[in-house]
């Protein structure tokens, strides 16, 4: 049973990261479709991430719950939905899925002779020189923590309310769309350590190590946001905090 959950999280994260970061390659400010306005590009990327999250959720929720995000898995572990071993397996699967997704995107972009991949990127997140508005590290930690708090809060409330079961994927996908729209100008919108991990590793392989050097922010901040979301969720429910 655990292998099915592992594969579900791996494939789900792969699809989410591949579809979302491919949208970055097409619609980002340096993307193949960079003639689009910045606003149109941001909205387009966010919609792709949101739709991908919705599709993936409905595909795999009956198997693993469709976390596809280490921050979600940590929150669900503390909420008692999964065991410690399952949380570790989920996170390993998510990181591997994201890395495979970024590797596939790199392979596709290499098939386009006119593309400079080091300029185009593979959807990496970052602050300072990697931020559209040159956000500093403190701002990056704050915005990523807050946006992840919002997303994980929605996730926790939706998956634990049987009345919302049929539309849970739509609500979770909509929440991801919203926080991605808000996050792109600041950091590229991570809200998901795995989503930042894959592109950062691939860019390092290409000789561009800035995203990997900044990765700690996108590992730490979503976890902070997720833990705060869990605590607030428990307080609102009047339940004991683990």
Image: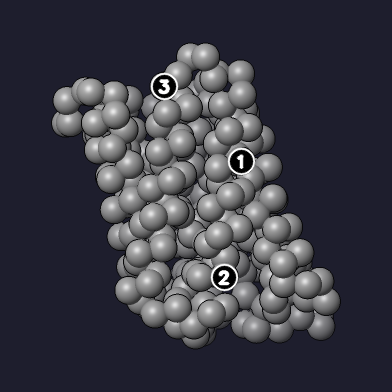
Q: Which mark is residue 209?
A: none
- Relative to the observer, which residue lies in front, 94 or 54? 54
At which x and y percent is residue 78? 25, 34
* SS class, disc 2: helix
Of mark 1 and mark 2, the one earlier in the sequence is: 1
Query: Image height check: is 106 above or below 89?
Result: below
At which x and y percent is residue 82? 31, 28
Residue shown at 63% from the left, 60% from the top: 21
Q: Which residue is mark 2?
A: 185
Quarter of the image for residue 197 reads bottom left
Quote the CA–CA distance across marks 3 and 1. Answer: 17 Å
Q: Is residue 65 visible?
A: yes
Q: Are marks 3 and 1 in contact (CB under 8 Å)?
A: no
Q: Is residue 202 visible?
A: no
Task: Give the left or right position of residue 91, taking residue 180 as reference.
Answer: left
Residue shown at 52% from the left, 49% from the top: 97
Q: Are marks 2 and 3 in contact (CB under 8 Å)?
A: no
Q: Which residue is mark 3?
A: 160
**The N terminus lies in which quarter of the figure?**
top left
Residue shown at 57% from the left, 56% from the top: 180
* SS class, disc 1: helix
Q: Which residue is mark 1?
A: 174
Residue shown at 45% from the left, 34% from the top: 155
Of mark 3 and mark 1, the one earlier in the sequence is: 3
Quote the CA–CA distance across marks 1 and 2. Answer: 18 Å
- Relative to the observer, which residue lies in front, 75 or 18? 75
């Amino acid at each position: 049973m655990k292998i099915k959950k592992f594969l579900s999280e791996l494939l789900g994260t792969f699809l989410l990261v591949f579809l979302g970061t491919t949208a970055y390659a097409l619609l980002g400010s340096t993307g193949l479709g960079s003639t689009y306005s910045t606003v149109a590009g941001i909205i387009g990327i966010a919609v792709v991430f949101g739709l991908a999250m919705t599709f993936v959720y409905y595909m795999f929720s009956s198997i693993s719950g469709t976390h596809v995000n280490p921050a979600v898995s940590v929150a669900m572990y503390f909420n008692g939905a999964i065991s410690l071993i399952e949380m570790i397996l989920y996170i390993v699967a998510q990181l591997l899925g994201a890395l495979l997704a970024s590797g596939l995107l790199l392979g596709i972009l290499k098939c386009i002779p006119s593309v400079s991949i080091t300029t185009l990127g593979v959807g990496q997140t970052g602050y300072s020189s990697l931020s559209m508005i040159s956000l500093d590290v403190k701002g990056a930690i704050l915005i990523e923590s807050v946006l992840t708090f919002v997303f994980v809060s929605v996730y926790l409330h939706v998956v634990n309310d049987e009345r919302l079961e049929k539309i849970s994927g739509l609500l979770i996908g909509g929440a991801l769309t919203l926080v991605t729209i808000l996050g792109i100008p600041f950091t590229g919108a991570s809200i998901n350590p795995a989503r930042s991990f894959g592109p950062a590793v691939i860019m390092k392989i290409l000789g561009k190590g800035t995203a990997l050097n900044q990765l700690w922010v996108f590992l730490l901040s979503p976890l902070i946001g997720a833990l705060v979301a869990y605590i607030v969720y428990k307080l609102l429910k009047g339940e004991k905090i683990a």
